[in-house]
Amino acid sequence: MLAADLGPAAVGGFTTRAGGVSRGAYESLNLGAGVSDDPDSVATNRRRVAERLGRPVAYLTQVHSDRVHAVSAPPEPDVVAVAEADASLTDRADVGLGVLVADCVPILLAGEHLVAAVHAGRRGLLAGVLSNTLSRMRAAGAPALFASIGPSICGRCYEVPAQLRSESAALIPELAATTSWGTPSLDLVAGVRVQLAEAGVASVQHHDRCTREDPDLFSYRRDGLTGRFAGVVALAG
């Protein structure tokens, strides 16, 4: 697991492909339950991550939205997803939060008594999922002090049509980028960084690894049929 620097109040990190039991296109630590992998393998992989974090992990059914779900209790053992949303937060130390990715940006946030996990793809970022999560944390009296950005597809690789780049940059100018082969693209991490800065997050860590370029990470853009890795976070203690 790639460790997340979230200060003294939280623990967490980002998984890679290694350390699980899935086979074939999902080899080996696939944590996604909706990608046609063997359910028993996914359950085993999720148990391994929970053991590493030291508590059960609440995952979401992610729909590229701006929805933020408050997790108020650990999930039951057979629950695949606790809500349909793209971010979660909790003030409980007995449950971890998880978001699943295979090119989108996983973001882990920590305040004094609150942690959050955010799944930010293009649609979710433009819809406001990260800004909504940061606002929810401020409203709860625990603004995000630390952020850790996990691996994701980079601006060199995230090719999009020119019109889509223009439409996205009209909302978040920092998203506009160009691929390494000279075509329009989006830099999702640049968009994430500007929103974190606007929210006053003082400490921002970035695991600068591109999912499309790195074979140790799942990438939908590269492989199509593939698994999902995760960003997971929990309050310390």
Image: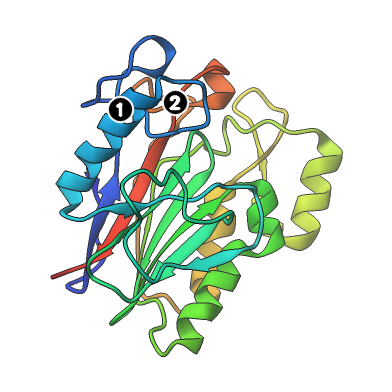
- Please tell me whether mark 2 sits on a helix, a strand or a loop: loop
Distance from Cα at disc 2 to Cα at disc 1: 8 Å
The C terminus - image quarter: bottom left
Q: Examine the rendered structure and indicate whether residue 150 appears above or below residue 9.
A: above
Which residue does the image show at 59% across and 72% down from the upper left? 132
Q: Amino acid at mark 1?
A: Leu
Quarter of the image for residue 9 reads bottom left
Which residue does the image show at 44% across and 32% down from the upper left? 228
Camera-side residue of 132 and 7: 132
Is residue 115 toward the left or the right of residue 223 in the image?
Answer: left
Which residue does the image show at 50% across and 72% down from the upper left? 197
Residue 227, numbered circle = 2
Q: Amino acid at mark 2?
A: Gly
Q: Position of residue 191 (x, y in %)?
A: 59, 57
On the question of residue 208 being in view, the answer is no
Q: Position of residue 55 (x, y in %)?
A: 20, 56
Q: Position of residue 100 (x, y in %)?
A: 45, 42
Is residue 29 toward the left or the right of residue 156 in the image?
Answer: left
* Mark 2 vs 1: CB contact within 8 A: yes
Mark 2 is surrounded, within 10 Å at the Cα level, by few (under 14), some (14 to 19) or many (20 or more) other residues, namely: many
Which residue does the image show at 35% across and 29% down from the upper left? 42
Camera-side residue of 34 and 29: 34
Residue linked to disc 1: 29
Q: Disc 2 or 1, which lies upstream in sequence?
A: 1
On the question of residue 18 being in view, the answer is yes
